Amino acid sequence: MKELKHINKYFYKYRYRLLLGVLITIAAKIFALFTPRFIGKAITTISNAINGDISNEVFKTELTTNILYLVGAAVIAGVFTFLMRQTIINVSRYIEYDLKNEVYQQYQNLSLNFYKANRTGDLMNRISEDVGKVRMYAGPAIMYTINTVTLFIVALIYMLSVAPKLTLYTVMPLPILSFIIYKLSSIINKRSRIVQEYLSHLSTYTQESFSGISVIKSYGIEQENYDEFNALSEESKQKQIDLTKVQALFFPSMILLIGISNILVAYVGGMQYINGEIKEIGTIAEFLIYVNMLTWPVATVGWVTNLVQQAEASQKRINEFLEEEPEIKNNNPTPSEITGNIDFRKVTYIYPDTNIKALDDVNFTIKKGETLAILGKTGSGKSTILDLIGRLYDVQEGTIKIDGVAIDQIHLKSLRKNIGYVPQDAFLFSDTIENNIKFGKEDATNEEIVNAAKYADVHKNIQKFNKGYQTKLGERGITLSGGQKQRISIARAIIKAPEIMLFDDCLSAVDTETEEKILMSLRKISQGKTTVIVSHRVSSAKDADKIIVLEDGKIIQNGTHESLVNSDGYYKELYLKQLSTKEL
């Protein structure tokens, strides 16, 4: 139960609803226990009438009274049972809702390195399947525990007062039943954990396959992919079957022991009635009903134990992520004003998951309103600079200052709110084009959306779609071309009107003519704003105020376009190469 302590705060939050549920549960069980008593009295009345011990008038009166009491008790018990489920089960749904939100919020707080180390399918399984297991503990497990305790206390007290010896025979098989189901539940729990793990594997595999379906098709490896999935699915099926085999013993065991209890009650009770130890024949019928009423709660002891064990295992998996400390923390609770001055001093960064040194002693300064272009070969550290400016990672050595303040001392939300970031791999959501652009500014007007699209030179493309800006995109914007995705991503950054604009090789999928149009637009809207452009093309960098060239994380050249083309080095070689291929 150690791991499940995490949700005690939710029990406290909904304590009044839970308390009401407990009271209703107790009331429901008390009224339910009146039913066997009235049935027993009715049978005794019938027996007395058959034996001639009472008159027909008394028989009719007593039988009618018992039936009315029986119906009344059953109706009241039914109403309370309904209310019981409406309170306790609803509380479990509230807890499930809160826990899912807590997990999702934690997912958003965790840093990028966390997502590099964990698969999407596993993340999804923990927030869905595992939280669902915890809900079963917070609802049904608690409800049936209260049911069992209440039923046993009230029923046993009454049964012992009526027929102590018969009571002992009645409950004799029940501990055996509870023990058998407990042992079965332990095995079920172990196999359930294995099934959960395989579900995570399946979720991860299918999610990656669906996301990369275009690659699978283009390489013609559908059959190989299917074979791998089939093998994984076969293993998962076998684990499910292993679990089902054990679960199949659950109800037969319960029915067997119910039958044994009924036989004992009928035999022992009959002998006691014959010997005069029990005065009323209805008592035997009454005890037979109690046997059936008590058997399920006893069986639920093992079942509830299984639920608790599964919830414990699932909550442990959830806690692993909830206890994960975000690497990037907001160290300043006060919102910060950002103007856009950026200063890198002796910045070194090594990726912890690969130990690759992405940046090595990098120094540069960008003043508000200036444009910096960063060029270099693949893997030279260009994108890492943008990630550090957006504080997606924290530097291990050196300092980064924004407006003269260390970046880790700036209010994190204020920093990112003032940054318009266009990643190299444009990501669009499965939503309308309008909402994808508005992602940068939720309260944007139609005019602002259209203007942003025009600046990104994508407005005319959007108009050609049947539904225009209301066109619904496929997953990750799969219905668009690479260039259209990049330009919509640029429009999303533009609409924010941020103080700092970061472009990570975001024009690689457009032709040079379109690139020039977008660059002209960016020059207009970036006036007075700090802009950083990462590119492989000299055409994207030539108008920048400053240019730096990276190699293996180090700055090997810096200056303006004019100074660099007149100096031997990487920039001049790239310029001449692209000039000869008419990329300029």
Image (tube, helix red, strand yellow):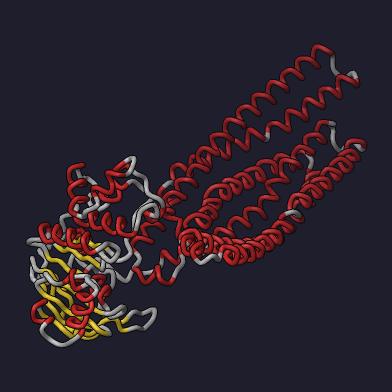
- Tell me: residue 109, above or below residue 156: below
38 vs 578, left or right, is: right
Residue at screen point 53% across, 60% down? 206
Q: Tell whether 439 sits left or right of 219.
A: left
Quarter location, residue 111: bottom left
Q: Residue at x 76, y 19 (%)?
A: 62
Residue nearer the viewer, 395 or 279:
395
Q: Position of residue 402 (x, y in %)?
A: 14, 70
Res 418 visible: no
* Residue 429 percent across, percent down from the top left: 36, 53
| Residue 144 place in picture, x, y as percent | 61, 46
Res 186 quadrant in image: bottom right
Q: Quick one: 319 or 124, which is closer to the camera?
A: 124
Residue for point 14% across, 76% down: 547
Residue 445 visible in the shown view: yes
Q: Nearer the viewer, residue 276 or 96?
A: 96
- Residues 316 and 80: in front is 316
* Image spot of residue 135 (x, y percent): 52, 51
> Which quarter of the image is occupied by the C terminus?
bottom left
Which residue appears farthest toward the bottom when viewing the image?
568
